[in-house]
C-alpha cells in the first residue's frame, strides 16, 4: 500500500477502502479544495512505473469528455444542443422519419431511442465477452448501421443508456466544426484544462496500465474503440483525472467555465419511478450537504469511477485494472464519496 501526497485520517480511510477492492492495481484518490490525497495498492506486485503515474483506460467515463466538448462547441456558437443530428450528417440517407428527429441533446442524455449497442455487435459480445468488436467497427459502418436502425422509442421520450448514441456525437461534431474529433477534443478540452497525460487511445508518452479479466490474472490488450471512440476511448493518468475533477468543482478558474457549469445542470429524471436525476452527462444523486455527480466506465480489462460534490469541493477517483463487479471498486468508491459528503475532511 502506498500513499502519495497528504495522508492523515483521510489517507487512512482511503487505505482501508483499497483493501476492499480486489484488483491487480488500484488507485484511490480524493481532492478536497485542491488538496490531494492518493493511495495505491493491489494484489499484483507493484509495477516498475508507480501506479499513480500510469495511464488508464476510462471506458464510458470518456463520455463526460465528449459531452463537455459538445457543451463547449455550443458555448462557442459552433452548434446548438438542439440541432438535429441529421443536419450535421447531410450526406447520410435516413429512411426512418424518427431518426431524423434525433437532436444532439438526445444523444448526450441517452434519450435518442437508440439501443445500447448496434444489434450486429450483440451476438458477438454474448459469445465472446472479451473479444473487442468495436475495433473492427469503423465510423463508416457506424453511420451505415445508424441509417438502417429503427428506434426503440421516439426521441426524447425515454432514457436508455446508449454507447451507440454517444458514438454518433463524434461524427456530428466533426460535421459541425469542420475538424476531426481527436483534434477537437485535444484543442478545446484537453489542452485548455492542462490534461497533458490524457489522449484518445494509448498515448505516445507515458506507460499504459495493463488490464485483466475478471479472474484478475489474465492480461487484456488495450481496447481499440474504432468508430465508438467518442463513447469510450480516452486514456488518462490519475493526476489528470484529479485536475479534471477540480475543473468541475471550480469552473470559474478554468478557460471553460460556461461549458463546465452547463454539464452539471439537472435536466431529466430517470430510473424506477423517476427517482434519479441526470445532467447533460453526469448521474446526479442527493447526499448530505448537496448533490453528488458521478460517472463510471469500464473496458475489457479496467474500470474507472469519478465523482464529486460541488458544495463541499470534494472529488474522488477510483481506478482498477480488473473487469467485473466482484472487484467491488464502483460500490466502494461511491460509498466513500457519499460518506465524505457534507462532513469535514482532514
Image: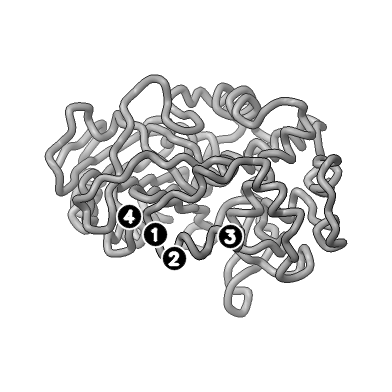
Confirm whether residue 2 shows in the render. Answer: yes
For the residue pair 128 and 21, the one nearer the viewer reads as: 128
For residue 120, which numbered disc appears in the image? 3
x then y, percent, for residue 89: 80, 41
Q: Determine which of the numbered discs, if any, sits on residue 129 in the image.
A: 1
Residue drawn where x is 15% and y is 48% of the image: 43
Task: Relative to 84, say whether 214 is above or below.
Answer: below
- Select label 3 or label 1 by which is in front: 3
Q: Which residue is mark 4?
A: 323
Q: Are marks 2 and 1 in contact (CB under 8 Å)?
A: yes
Give the image location of residue 131, x and y in percent.
40, 52
Label 4 vs label 1: CA separation? 11 Å
Sequence-earlier tag: 3 or 1: 3
Q: Identify the residue at the far left of this view.
A: 45
- Callout in the foreground (4, 3): 3
Query: Label 4 neighbourhood size at 10 Å, few (<14), some (14-19), many (20+)?
Result: many
Residue at the spot 49% in from the left edge and 46% down from the top edge: 61
* Colouring used for the render: one colour
Residue 210: x %, y % from top left = 28, 39
Q: Dot 3 surroundings within 10 Å: few (below 14), some, or many (20 or more)?
A: few
Q: Are marks 3 and 2 in contact (CB under 8 Å)?
A: no
Residue at 86% in and 41% down: 90
The secondary structure type at the circle numbered 3 is helix
Q: CA distance from mark 2 to mark 1?
A: 6 Å
CB-based contact (under 8 Å), mark 4 and mark 2 = no
Q: Which residue is mark 2?
A: 126
Cα–Cα gap, marks 3 and 2: 11 Å
Q: Residue 231: give x, y in percent of width and height.
A: 57, 46
Closest to the observer, 124 or 97: 124
Q: Is residue 207 left or right of residue 133?
A: left
Amino acid at each position: 500500500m502506498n500513499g502519495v501526497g497528504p495522508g492523515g485520517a483521510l489517507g487512512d480511510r482511503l487505505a482501508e477502502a483499497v483493501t476492499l477492492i480486489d484488483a491487480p492495481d488500484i488507485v484511490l484518490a480524493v481532492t478536497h479544495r485542491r488538496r490531494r490525497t492518493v493511495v495505491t495498492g493491489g494484489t499484483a506486485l507493484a509495477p516498475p512505473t508507480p501506479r499513480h503515474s500510469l495511464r488508464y483506460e476510462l471506458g464510458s467515463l470518456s463520455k463526460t469528455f465528449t459531452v463537455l466538448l459538445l457543451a463547449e462547441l455550443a458555448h462557442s456558437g459552433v452548434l446548438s444542443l438542439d440541432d438535429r443530428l441529421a443536419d450535421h450528417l447531410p450526406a447520410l440517407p435516413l429512411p426512418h422519419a424518427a431518426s431524423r428527429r434525433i437532436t444532439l441533446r438526445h444523444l448526450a442524455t441517452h434519450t435518442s431511442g437508440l439501443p445500447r449497442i448496434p444489434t450486429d455487435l450483440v451476438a458477438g459480445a454474448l459469445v465472446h465477452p472479451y473479444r473487442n468488436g468495436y475495433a473492427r467497427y469503423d465510423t463508416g459502418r457506424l453511420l451505415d448501421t445508424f441509417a438502417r436502425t429503427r428506434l426503440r422509442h421516439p426521441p426524447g421520450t425515454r432514457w436508455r443508456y446508449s454507447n451507440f448514441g454517444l458514438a454518433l456525437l463524434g461524427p456530428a461534431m466533426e460535421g459541425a466544426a469542420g475538424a476531426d474529433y481527436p483534434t477537437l477534443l485535444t484543442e478545446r478540452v484537453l489542452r485548455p484544462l492542462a490534461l497533458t497525460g490524457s489522449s484518445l487511445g494509448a498515448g505516445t508518452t507515458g506507460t499504459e496500465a495493463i488490464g485483466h479479466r475478471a479472474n484478475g490474472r489474465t492480461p487484456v490488450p488495450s481496447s481499440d474503440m474504432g468508430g465508438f471512440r467518442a463513447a469510450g476511448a480516452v486514456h488518462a493518468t490519475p493526476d489528470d483525472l484529479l485536475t479534471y475533477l477540480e475543473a468541475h468543482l471550480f469552473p470559474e478558474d478554468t478557460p471553460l467555465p460556461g461549458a463546465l457549469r452547463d454539464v452539471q445542470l439537472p435536466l431529466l429524471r430517470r430510473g424506477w419511478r423517476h427517482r434519479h436525476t441526470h445532467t447533460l452527462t453526469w448521474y446526479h444523486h442527493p447526499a448530505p450537504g448537496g448533490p453528488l455527480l458521478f460517472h463510471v466506465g469500464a473496458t475489457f480489462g479496467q474500470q474507472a469511477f469519478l465523482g464529486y460534490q460541488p458544495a463541499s469541493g470534494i472529488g474522488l477517483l477510483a481506478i482498477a485494472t480488473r473487469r467485473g463487479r466482484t472487484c467491488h471498486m464502483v460500490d466502494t468508491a461511491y460509498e466513500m464519496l457519499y460518506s465524505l459528503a457534507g462532513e469535514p475532511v482532514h
